[in-house]
Image (cartoon, helix red, strand yellow):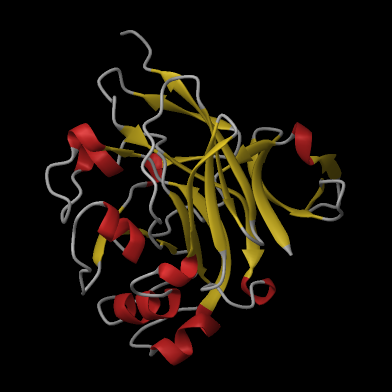
Amino acid sequence: MKRARIAHHGSAVWAELVDQDNTLRLGNGETIPAADAHWLAPVTPGASIFALGLNYADHVKELGFKTKEPPLIFLKGMNTLAGHRGTTVRPDDANQMHPECELVAIIGKPARHVTADQALDLVGGYTIACDYAIREYLENYYRPNLRVKNRDGTTPLGPWIVDAADISDPQALRLRTLVNGNTVQEGTTQDMVLDVAGLIAYLSQTMTLLPGDMILTGTPQGVHFCAAGDEVICEIEGIGRLSNRLIAEPKP
């Protein structure tokens, strides 16, 4: 099953995809065309959002680093999220802003001190993130600073949450990013340094993971700097296509 979070009559509601014609069914039974929906980031309010840096071997090599364990993990605020078909502001001085396509694992059951063998049973679903990075603002690759990874609206998320049961192997999915129709990033989740199960097990040793918590699992190789007006699409096999457009920074 695929679920989306949308704005409907002034409220945030969940809807599910009911057919191949992209019809959404709301909880009250009402149906609307997906093309008419105002998409929101499919996130549970109050959830923790974890993000990974340098978790794909090919991307680590591309940046000239060595594989790092334990993994580089940082937190993201709710302010960073944007919905499918939304817009993201490109700061005027961000000439090295690039998209990062990421598989997102969503916790479905509380997890504390779990093993990697147990971890996937606790996943509720998966979605897609386009986690923009701004290289001019980077102070330290091993410690992403606030201006790089927590700017408003720089992490589009969605469009769907796909049930974990519908993804037989999260380590066998192809990822791709297109800018204005041209492929600029491509890879496979098989190239993760620490896989989804390992990440959940690792995080659960420090804190209790709760239903709705999200783990952005890193991005493959491919650095492409974007400009205002660019259309960016992140695709993950079996999950969908997340669309976003960059806009110029409004004048004060």
Residue at the far left: name it: 139
Query: Between residues 108 and 201, which one lies in front from this camera angle?
Result: 201
Q: Nearer the viewer, residue 195 or 107?
A: 195
Residue 155: quarter of image: top left
Write the residue at 33% across / 56% down.
59
| Lateral position of residue 160 relative to residue 74, left or right | right
| Nearer to us in this view, 95 or 126 | 95
Look at 40% across and 56% down and name the residue there: 220
User: The C terminus is located in which quarter?
Assistant: top left
Q: Where in the figure is residue 178, as x and y percent of width and height?
A: 54, 39
Quarter in which the N terminus is drawn: bottom right
Q: Quadrant of residue 9?
A: top right
Q: Position of residue 13 (x, y in %)?
A: 67, 47
Count of numbered circles on the image? 0
On screen, 193 above or below 100? below
Pinpoint residue 98: horizontal percent, then vertical percent. Answer: 37, 37
**Residue at x-position 38% and y-position 88%:** 114
The residue sitting at 39% across, 73% down in the picture is: 209
Is residue 92 depicted above or below 205 in this figure? above
